[in-house]
Amino acid sequence: MSDHRIGLVVPSSNTTMETEIPAMLRRRESVDATVRFTTHASRVRLRQVNPDELARMNRSAPRCAAELADARCDVLAYACLVAVMCEGPGAHERAERRLGRASRRAGHDMPVVTSAGALVAGLRALDARRVALIAPYLPPMTATVAAYLAAHGVRVTEAVSLSEPDNVAVGRIPTSRLAGLAQRLDVTGVDAVVLSACVQLPSLAAVPWVEARLGRPVLTAATATVHQLLTTVGVDPYVPDAGRLLAGSTAP
């Protein structure tokens, strides 16, 4: 039996991250009795998705890393995608180093992943250079996400903004609405679809359904984060019914 402690730095208003990420880890356990995951969270204040609150959250995140270091987690995930992307190209690497330093100062060295870096890595794993995406943010924030991906070699051909700055309200957006919006995306020439560019926007249940209908790989900030978490702890990134990215390293 291989036990893995997963540390999560959670925005205080997030109600989805601690649902979807553990759900995927339970699915992974269901197909391999030799692995077991536990999740351990520390929360950092965020209510409105705007530059000031996101910057304040980034400044507070090292405290969470120190708390999770006390739990001797095997890996830490900072899963607020746009907070990192607002700091400009390459910010996920800087954030990972910053939180890694905080955990070491607290007495425990652990690898750090971010949902921003995980999305970039996930798109590379799929060899996706042109994507369509859906985001809950106001249009300027969605444009920040598109610019960040462009700086890392991924062109966003179409971006849908749901224009919801209240993070609690984002978590209440029905997954059925997301699926309906996805069906209206123009996927001509697109290599993949980012169904949810935010870990707070509920999307996991719609991933296989949308993927089957659009005929393109579908990933989300949450599925990309789980892919990175599993890869980091040395577990094959296979999760049933979570899209092509999580089809496992031996998938065609």
Image: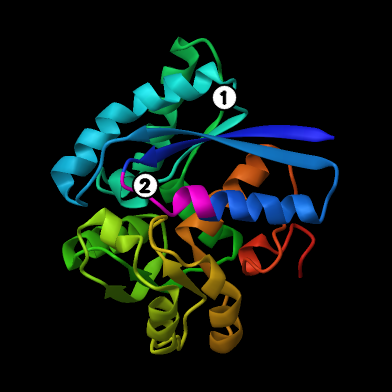
Residue 123 place in picture, x, y as percent: 52, 61
Residue that appears at 75% across and 33% down: 3
Image vertical order of residue 115 relative to residue 153, above or below: above
Front-lying residue, 196 or 206: 206
Element at label 1:
loop
Q: Quadrant of the N terminus?
A: top right
- The three-letter amino acid code for the residue at tag 2 is Cys
Identify the residue at image location x=38%, y=69%. Answer: 155
Along the horizontal axis of the image, is 249 left or right of 200? right
The total number of labels drawn is 2
State the separation of the CA atoms marked 2 and 1.
19 Å
Specify few, some or many for label 2: CA neighbours under 10 Å numbering under 14, 14-19, or 20 or more.
many
Which range of residues does the magenta coloring cover? 13-19
Which residue is drawn at the image coordinates 62% and 66% (left, top)? 242
For badge 1, the amino acid type reads Met
Above or below, 198 against 130 in this view is above
Position of residue 33 measured from the top left corner of the image (x, y, whole percent): 85, 46
On the image, numbered disc 1 is attached to which residue? 110
- In the rendered image, which residue does mark 2 sit on? 80
